[in-house]
Amino acid sequence: MSTPVLRLWRKLEARPFGKRVFSWIICHKAPYFASIAPRMASLEPGRGEATIAQRRRVTNHIGTVHAIALCNLAEFVGGLTCDVSLPASMRWIPKGMTVEYLKKANGTQRAVATPAFPPREAGDGYDLPMDVVVTDPDGDTTFTARIAMWVSPRARRPG
């Protein structure tokens, strides 16, 4: 199983600046993610990891990483992980997210996304929860998210 996103990741990940280029390409395709400057660290079916550095543009009024920046990081890594985990005949779209802010988020935040169960091919759509855990440089969990992904068959083209 290999999606276009996974093929691109595998092509770039080991090259100099490849992870940065990959992240930039994703942000170009989905521009809102550029607001947090995420960096993909690893990506494979069933697991993805990305980070954001603490910098002024993602900081709130109390000097910690902003709650919505953490939500964006979760959607970034959760969406990419979902994409590379699905059978080629299926597509996805987020339809909701439940989050918990567990600790003030200071420093580089590391997000790991995993599906709640292995994605499968299906004739009808189904819910696929993606779990995201965000940790700080000390390894403490600062934030968790469960993203409700709607997975459905790709439209068949006539012909």
Image: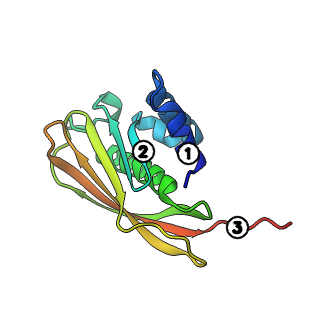
Q: Nearer the viewer, residue 122 or 99?
A: 122
Q: Which residue is mark 2?
A: 43
Q: Is residue 139 left or right of residue 70?
A: left
Sequence-wise, the earlier of marks 2 and 3 is 2
- Kindly identify the residue that appears in the image at 50 percent across and 75 percent down: 126
Q: Is residue 27 visible?
A: no
Task: Please report contact status of discs 3 and 1: CB closer than 8 Å, yes or no.
Answer: no
Q: Which residue is mark 3?
A: 155
Q: In the image as oriented, which residue stretches furthest toward the right?
A: 159
Q: In the image as oriented, which residue stretches furthest toward the front?
A: 1
**Residue 33 % position (x, y):** 47, 41
Between marks 2 and 3 in the image, the one whose residue lies nearer the viewer: 2
**Residue 78 % position (x, y):** 41, 53
Q: Is residue 4 left or right of residue 70?
A: right
Q: Element under label 3?
A: loop
Q: CA distance from mark 3 to mark 1?
A: 19 Å
Q: Nearer the viewer, residue 14 or 26?
A: 14
Task: Please report contact status of discs 2 and 1: CB closer than 8 Å, yes or no.
Answer: yes
**Residue 141 % position (x, y):** 18, 49
Say which mark, if any, is on residue 5.
Answer: 1
**Residue 31 % position (x, y):** 54, 39
- Kindly identify the residue that appears in the image at 62 percent across and 64 percent down: 89
